[in-house]
Image (tube, grey):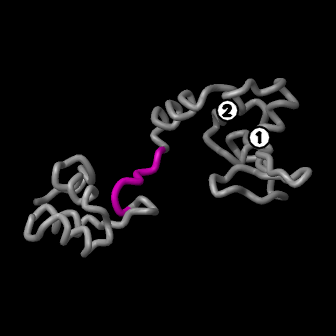
Amino acid sequence: MYTEAGCHEVISHSLSSYRYVQLERDGRRYQLHREIYEQHHGPIPPGMVVRHICDNPACINPGHLRIGTQADNVADMHARRRQADRRGEAHGEAKLTDAAVRHIRRREMTGRAYAALYGVSESAVSLVLRGKAWTHVEGE
């Protein structure tokens, strides 16, 4: 399938959780955009990644694929403002909530008591109290 932006999207294969087209060969999974890059541009040097200049991970258009470092890839993400805000409750593994952080900052109980109440370590509570964690939460 072709998009207005010139992307070539494959609809016949499954997508990874990051929306990359995956294929399986000899019991191993591969990202198709890496295979396409190598077919058109040559081997991918060790430690390098294949970046999508179109910001579409499902795209396999060889003209949209560039080689670079992971740092280049992250810089692209920030420059194009496509990073997700995964702080606090938005992080999939967060044990605290914004309300719990505000409660901890009221210092009504000991760190040990807060840790037991919220199922976190005392050091996690300490980081909240010292302003080293959950810095985006305003309030007490």
Q: Residue at x 26, y 64 (%)?
A: 98
Identified by mark 1, the residue type is His
Specify the quadrant that holds the C terminus.
Answer: bottom left
Q: Secondary structure at mark 1?
A: helix
133 to the left or right of 78: left
Q: How many marks?
A: 2
Residue 33 got which mark? 1
Question: Relative to 8, does residue 129 appear above or below in the rendering?
Answer: below
Give neighbour class at mark 2: few <14, some 14-19, many 20+ (Cα, 10 Å): some
Residue that lies at the very extreme toward the right in this rendered image? 26
Q: Which residue is mark 2?
A: 49
Range of magenta residues: 83-89
Q: Secondary structure at mark 2?
A: strand
Give neighbour class at mark 1: few <14, some 14-19, many 20+ (Cα, 10 Å): many
Of badges 1 and 2, the one in the foreground is 2
Identified by mark 2, the residue type is Val
Q: Residue at x 80, y 51 (%)?
A: 29
